[in-house]
Image: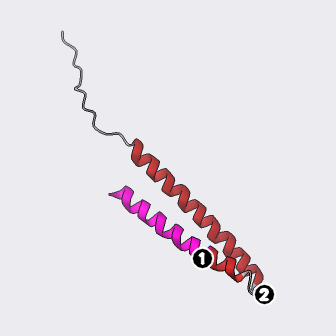
Amino acid sequence: MKTKLVLTIAIVIGLLALISAGYCFWLMTVPLSYRWVPVVLIGFVVAAGVFVISMIISFVVLIRSRISPRASNTPEIKPTI
């Protein structure tokens, strides 16, 4: 349950960051006043960084959920004396 929640939150944050990065990238093609250029560039870099981090978190959560220890079907071996 916790894994699904973390994965869902990471994907939603990644999607919002990707949309923000796309918007900032589009703003780079529009003539802006010089005072907005650093804001758009920093916004693009931050949004791209957040997207990458959220995808790394998603990947780690998926890998950990695949490797998580499960109950084995083999019976426990007890020593006989």
- Residue name at image x 38 percent, y 62 percent: 5
- Residue name at image x 49 percent, y 57 percent: 58
Element carrying mark 1:
helix
Q: Main secondary structure of the magenta part?
A: helix
- Residue name at image x 44 percent, y 47 percent: 64
- Mark 2 vs mark 1, CA separation in Å: 19 Å
Q: Where does the image place residue 76, in percent across and percent down from the top left?
A: 23, 25
- Residue name at image x 46 percent, y 47 percent: 63
Q: Is residue 55 above or below residue 63?
A: below
Q: Is disc 2 in contact with disc 1, using a CB cutoff of under 8 Å?
A: no
Determine the residue located farthest toward the top in the rendered image: 81
Determine the residue located farthest toward the right in the rendered image: 34
Q: Which quadrant, please, contains the N terminus?
A: bottom left
- In which image quadrant can residue 39 be found? bottom right
Magenta stretch contains residue 20: yes
Q: Where does the image place residue 59, in percent across and percent down from the top left?
A: 50, 53
- In which image quadrant can residue 32 be found? bottom right
Q: Which residue is mark 1?
A: 20
**Left or right: 31, with 75 as reference point:** right
Number of residues whose C-alpha sits closer than 10 Å to that of mark 2, classed few (under 14), some (14–19) or many (20 or more) = few
Amino acid tagged 2: Arg
Residue 35 numbered mark, or none:
2
Q: Foreground: 70 or 21?
A: 21
Residue range in magenta is 1-21
Q: Foreground: 46 or 16?
A: 16
Q: Please, which colouring scheme is shown?
A: secondary structure
Of circles 2 and 1, which is in front?
1
Residue 60 numbered mark, or none:
none
